[in-house]
Amino acid sequence: MDYSFSDFLEENRTKIILLIVFIIISIALMIGSSLLGKGNKEDELNYRLESLGVVYYEEIYYDSIDGEKEEYLDILKDIGIKVDLGTLILNVYNEDPEFFINEKVNEKCDYDKSYVVIYPKEPYQKKDYEIEYQLECGF
């Protein structure tokens, strides 16, 4: 019995279709991840900046307030507490961890222009606040 290419295709039709679908999905995922990957580093650095603000406020700033915390924080609720990235790094890490870098241009983020603003909220307990942040890294 002769075994032709068309016989091979007929017998393995399902496998061939699955293989083609797998290849198409793989290519789509590679393209999608490369397009989405552009924002991932910026998102990661924004998250780290916000996290530094959280640690700074909850573990350093809040605990350092002497006297009536509520009265003091009530004054700051509208204007906020602005802390630049350099100050956050010095207070939280005591040294530069050097991960605030825009890898596209291989430059450090601007430690003076990158900052968090912490807005204390009633009832002025340690976790009663909102954080806004600005990251200057050339993204």
Image: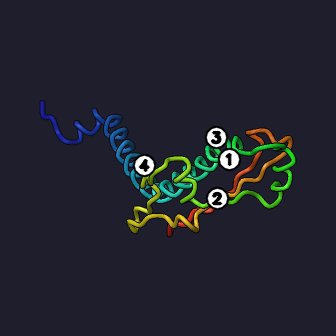
Q: Earlier in the sequence, mark 4 or mark 3?
A: 4
- Specify the label residue 83 is tagged with: 2
Q: Residue at x 76, y 53 (%)?
A: 119
Q: Earlier in the sequence, mark 3 or mark 2?
A: 3
- Tell me if label 1 and label 2 are in contact, CB under 8 Å: yes
- Residue 135 point in image, percent of width and height: 57, 62
Q: Camera-side residue: 75 or 115?
A: 75
- Tell me if label 4 and label 3 are in contact, CB under 8 Å: no
- Specify the label residue 61 is tagged with: 1
State how far apart marks 1 and 4 are (Cα): 44 Å
Q: Is residue 39 left or right of residue 29?
A: right
- Specify the label residue 59 is tagged with: 3
Q: Residue at x 35, y 35 (%)?
A: 14
Mark 4 Cα within 10 Å, few/some/many (few <14, many 20+)? Answer: few
Label 2 sits on what residue type? Val
Label 3 sits on what residue type? Glu
- Residue 81 point in image, percent of width and height: 72, 57
Q: Is residue 94 left or right of residue 130?
A: left
State how far apart marks 4 and 2 are (Cα): 39 Å
Residue at the disc numbered 4: 29
